[in-house]
Amino acid sequence: MPSTGKLAAAIPVPWELGGRAEEQFEKHLSAALETGPPTVVLDCAELQLTTSQHVELLWRARLRCQRGATDVRLQNPSPGLLRVLTVLDLADLFHCAPSPAADEADESITGVGPARAKYHDSFRPMAGETAPAAERFEAFLVPLPVPEMTRFELRTIFYEIASNISQHAGIDKDTPIAFWAEFKLGRIVMVFSDSGREYDPTAATVDFDARTAAKQRRVRGFGLPMVRRMTDTMSYIRGADGRNILTIVKTWSV
Amino acid sequence: MEACRFEHRVLHDDVFLINPGRILDNSNAHEMVHALTGAQADGFRYVVLDMTALEFLSSAGVGSLLGSVDLFREQGGDIILCHVPEPIMHILRVLDLADFFTIKSDTRQAAVACGKE
């Protein structure tokens, strides 16, 4: 870790992107960079759940800092953010350390179940492994305060994405697909990572009309539209290490 | 219908009943297509799918039904779903298929929809 000298106030990284909060972030970053500081601190406390858009925001911020020879330090990165950065081989480019508070997984809400929980699994891209992996993921969800129908949707989402990767990524059957999930009350982030050919399912997804599909005797191609309808956001990036990273966020009211 | 891999029986003269079991997904969706087209080829105008035991329906499972239903409807028949568990119903609603498929509460109501009883 380089010497940072006296650190300026940390710039909060917003969870909500694309609006005023993101504009504010860019403005604060510009102001901080005007004086050519050795280090800029980005406070990631809001990013308890991370999508690829958040990673892109951090990456853009880093590039701007790099132009002025300014280091970037992440404050309060959640374990999920650290994991995503590690998967993308970016962890070393952002100087960061987990905050003790952020690592308090599985804190309980009495009578409801854990308010936070993390899950990791990997499975081979074979038809016979997808369904059991989906069942394992559902088993992880059972003790959590997730409504039954949402749990069913999450199992379906897992199955559809895992099947899609298995069938289309062109990876060797012995090369595992990695999966992480981070649950927080009312929200779950699911991350699939595979080493297959570059494929952005968010670009390929088109919705369907039942009547037209029936007329066309269509039996395939419903998986991604189905996932789209069940999730809030689905984002894709091709990692620096050549891995496909698909991040899915689903929320529900609690 | 010796080719049908699912539990099945003839419900009426032109009504064939299939029980898809616990799971209808990538592993057996093609068999469902085979069973449905086979029933149609054997002269059954209606297929009733008793979904009592169905716990999981993937997009491939949905596709097997959606891609076959017009085969029956064009011949004045239909594929009728009955005993649909709530999670499966939920998936059908998400896909806007709850109104597209003919869905009945039980096999008796399904038979009535086929013009029997």
Image (cartoon, grey):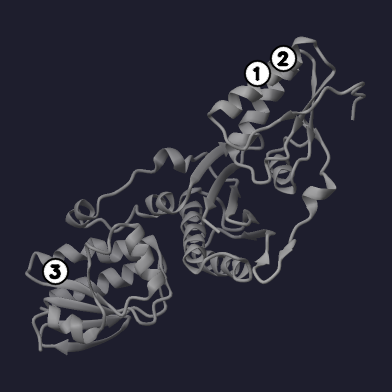
Do the residues indicated by labels 2 and 1 lie within the same chain of the protein? yes
Counting other residues with Cα less than 10 Å from the Cα at mark 1, is it few (<14), some (14-19), or many (20 or more)?
few
Look at the numbered discs 2 and 3 and tell me whether their residues touch, using CB distance below 8 Å. Answer: no
Q: Find residue B22 and report its horizontal and vertical position in percent.
A: 42, 78
In the rendered structure, the residue with mark 3 lies on which chain? B
Please give left or right for residue A132 compared with residue B105 in the image: right
Q: Say which of A72 and A167 sits in front.
A: A72
Which part of the image, by quadrant, shows the C terminus of chain B? bottom left
Q: Locate residue A243, reporting x and y percent.
A: 61, 41
Residue B44, image x, y percentages: 13, 79
Question: In the figure, is residue A66 to the left or right of A233?
Answer: right
Alpha carbons under labels 2 and 1: distance apart: 6 Å
Q: Which residue is mark 2?
A: A31
Q: Position of residue A253 (x, y in %)?
A: 52, 56
Q: Which residue position is annotated with label 3?
A: B72
Give the structural element (helix, strand or loop) at label 2. helix
Q: Residue at x 39, y 43 (%)?
A: A205
Q: Identify residue type, mark 1.
A: Lys
**Label pair 2/1, CB-CB below 8 angstroms:** yes
Q: Quadrant of residue B14?
A: bottom left
A73 or A114, which is in the foreground? Answer: A114
Disc 1 target residue: A27
Name above or below for residue A187 compared with residue B37: above
